[in-house]
Amino acid sequence: MEKGSHKIQVNQMIDIKSYFDPHLRKIVNSKKQIAVIPVGSLEQHGPHLPISTDSDIVTEVAKKICQKKNYLLLPTITYGVSHEHAPFFNLSLKEITLQRILLDLCLSLFENNIKTIFIINGHHGNISAIKNIDSKLQGKMKNKIRVFTLSYWHFMDRDFDHAGFVETSLMLAISNQVKMKLAKKGLLTDNMSKQEIKKISKMASKSFPKVTKNGIWGDPRKATKKDGQKLFSEIIKNLEKKCQTCLTGHD
């Protein structure tokens, strides 16, 4: 679709930043619309991945969901809650700041007649900020708006990591900014018990570098583009089903 075109096509992703006001209002007023807000972070991802990794991956996930479901795609909120990565590089918001941004944005969407919203999260440190968004809005809006918060890594079978095999494979599938020659093994939890992993995860949420030493959780050295493509397919398939369940109340 050409930018500014007045033809509304079915199953065409609507990336709102590329549209003009008259056309966007026509789309919003033509039927009930669903918006997607991707939320990422800017933080260290070892020596081989860019600091935009979380934002890059969640943007791609949100884009694919919007393409499949004809949802409205909002620009990614690229700043997240990443203080745990200090003294490694991070550009962080306070938890309450991110929450307020999302609350304001959801209310603004409502004022534009968009009453169903998916917040798709790409960074673990954002979870506390996003988890109560819906209940906070319901108190103000008296059930006139629906907001669902979903973290994309919950929709794959593999255990998630940080700059390890999973994230590196996903980035290889979408970016030419991966420096595989610089990839190094990080913290491995294969031989740890669930209790040990839970304990070390809690420590990492306070100081990721202290726990991992080099800022990497996992081993990225065998990551491939093909693995990343498979992971994306799995995530999108499962996330698409979850979105449908959220909207209808049944599978």
Image: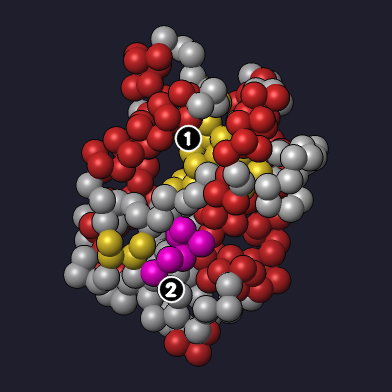
Q: Is residue 212 left or right of residue 35?
A: left
Decide which of tag 1 and tag 2 comes sooner along the chain. 2
Q: Position of residue 62 (x, y in %)?
A: 59, 48
Q: Which residue does the image show at 53% across and 44% down from the upper left?
A: 74
Q: Is residue 41 above or below residue 223?
A: above
Q: Residue at x 59, y 57 (%)?
A: 60
Q: Residue 244 appears in which quarter of the rendering? A: top right
**Numbered badge on residue 50:** 2
Visual colour scheme: secondary structure
Circle number at residue 23 = none
Between 71 and 162, the one lying in front of the other is 71
For badge 1, the amino acid type reads Thr
Q: Which residues are magenta?
A: 51-56
Q: Residue at x 43, y 73 (%)?
A: 50
Q: Position of residue 99 (x, y in %)?
A: 31, 37
Q: What's the amino acid at mark 2? A: Pro
Q: Horizontal and vertical percent for residue 220?
A: 50, 75
